[in-house]
Image: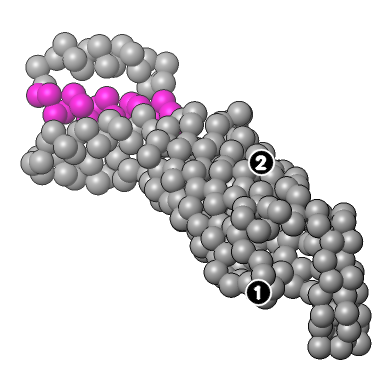
Amino acid sequence: MILKNSQQILSNCNSSQINEQAKRLIDILITFIEREGTDNEYNKKLESYKRDFKNKEYESFEKGFLPAKTIRASWGFSFGSGMIFTTDDLSKNFANNASFNMAMDINIGKVFTSLYMHATSLKLKEPFIAVSEVDTLDFKVDDKFPYIDAGIKGGYFIIRNDRFHLAPYVSISGSNLESNKYKSSEDNDLEYKIFDSFTYGAGIHTEIKLHEYSYPNMYYGYHYTQGYFSLKLEAGYNKILKFNDHYAKGDTPYVICAIVWGIGQF
């Protein structure tokens, strides 16, 4: 009944003699009923009301009928591809290559966090000979060196609205570039590492919502579970701190593009 007559109720309320604070409370309550739970519109109206009215005249009504503002939170899983680049000496010896990436993002309010992994193989551009403790290792052009980088990103949303995210971030991770060409189960010294290092970096995270959906949550009655699909684009730079090959130097910039399946509010 209230849903069908909500506009009439608001109209009658606005033309009545009750004070402005009571009118705002009724408007917020009707928004809550119409939206079948708390959402961004409800949060905005509740924030505005609490900012404008500091008194406790209707405190019992507020506590009894108006749920607290929900914190905007989401949990996303992403899979995609990208490019790993190299700089300095690394760029002279290894070709850039496409990469696979996966991540789990947790966004709460203005805070962006992501557990991630990038993986690819970098082809050798220049041949070289390395000497291990037990043998001489001959590497030729186009030999593949598997690369993996895994860690955590943390940032702050400059923009987080219903359609678009923008957040600069910093990252810490572990990165590894090595050849398994001469790998032997009997001798680990034949795995030649260019680096196996702690890395740190920075970058920019952007995300564009593609589709949003919701379905009734059986545990909370009228509340709905929200979800979305989005496109994530990131660009960053990793600083490598330590090289196993003392003649090597450089860093690993990257770009990624991934599809995100998220649960919660985008």
Examine the image and state in which quarter residue 88 appears.
bottom right
Q: Is residue 252 above or below residue 265?
A: below
**Residue denoted by label 2:** 258
Could you tell whether 236 is left or right of 72 in the image?
right
Say which mark, if any, is on residue 57. none
Q: Is residue 126 above or below residue 44?
A: below
> Foreground: 157 or 209?
157
Residue type, numbered disc 1: His
The x and y percentages for residue 132 are: 81, 83
SS of the residue under disc 2: strand
As measured in the structure, the alpha-carbon distance from the residue carrying label 2 to the one carrying label 1 is: 35 Å
**Residue for point 89% across, 61% down:** 140
Q: Residues within 10 Å of mark 1 (few under 14, many from 20)?
A: few
Of the residues under marks 2 and 1, which one precedes in the sequence?
Answer: 1
Residue type, numbered disc 2: Ala
Q: In the rendered structure, which segment of residues is drawn in magenta?
A: 19-36
> Is residue 26 magenta-colored?
yes
Q: Residues within 10 Å of mark 2 (few under 14, many from 20)?
A: many
